[in-house]
Image: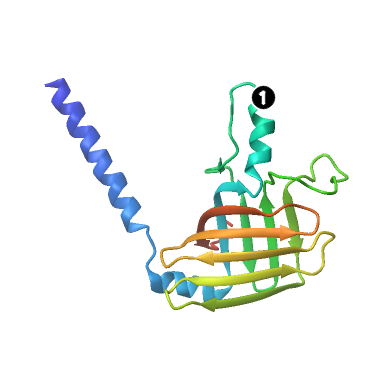
Amino acid sequence: MMKSLKFLCVTIISIFIAGNTIAQKPDEAEISRIVESKKFIFVADNATPTNSAELNRVMNSMSGGITAGSINLNGQGYDLKITPDSLTAYLPYYGRSYSAPIGQNEGGVKFKSKKFKYKSKKNKKGSWDIELNTNDINENYRMSLNIGKTGYASLSLSSNNKQNITYNGYITEITEKH
C-alpha cells in the first residue's frame, strides 16, 4: 500500500513538472517578438573555450583529471543583458588572456556598454543572427549571437586581448525582476 502511494505521488509530481516545462517553451512568434524588441537576456548554460586542448593539458595536471571541453554554467547566473540603450555582460572566461586584469575581481567578461553596434538578421531557416560590437569600454568585444526558433542560442565572443570563447544557452525576455 505504501509503495503504491509513493509511486502515485512520484508519478503526479513528474507529470506536473513535465507539463510546466512544456508549457514554458516559447514558440517561434514569441522568440521573434523578444528579439525584435531588443530587450532580452542571453543566459549561459555552458562555455566552450577555443583552445580546449591547451586547457585540458593544464587541467589534467590538477587532481581529479578534469577536462575543459565544455564547462557547465547551468544555474550560475551568467548572462548577457541586451536593451536598446545598454549591453551588460557578466560571463566567466576560460582561455588565454593576453593582458591581465588590474583588480582581483575583474576577471571574466564583465562590462556595461552604452555605445555599441547592434545588427540583427533573420535567416532563411527562421533563426536570428545578431552582431554586437562594444565601442566605449577598454576591451572592445565583438559578439555573434545565433538564436534558434525555440530560443536556444549560441554566443561567440572575441576581443583583441583574449582568445575566442563560445557560450551556449537560451534567451529570455527581460521582466521586472531582471
Q: Position of residue 149 (x, y in %)?
A: 42, 68
Work out whether residue 172 or residue 59 is closer to the camera in this orientation and state it: 59
The image shows residue 168, relative to residue 63, as above or below, that is: below
Q: Position of residue 127 (x, y in %)?
A: 46, 71
The image shows residue 45, relative to residue 171, as above or below, that is: above
Work out whether residue 47 or residue 59 is closer to the camera in this orientation and state it: 59
Q: Quadrant of residue 151?
A: bottom left
Image label count = 1
The residue to which callout 1 is attached is 62
Instruction: Name the residue at the right extreme.
Output: 102
The image shows residue 93, relative to residue 148, as above or below, that is: above
Structural crowding at the residue carrying mark 1, measured as other residues with C-alpha within 10 Å and reported as few (<14), some (14–19) or many (≥20): few
The image shows residue 174, relative to residue 128, as above or below, that is: above
Q: Residue at x 59, y 71 (%)?
A: 130
Q: Residue at x 67, y 33 (%)?
A: 57
Three-letter amino acid code at the position of disc 1: Met
Asked if residue 22 lies left or right of residue 2, the reply is right
Asked if residue 87 lies left or right of residue 48, the reply is right
Q: Residue at x 46, y 74 (%)?
A: 32
Looking at the rendered structure, the secondary structure element under dot 1 is: loop
Give the colour scheme of this rendering: rainbow
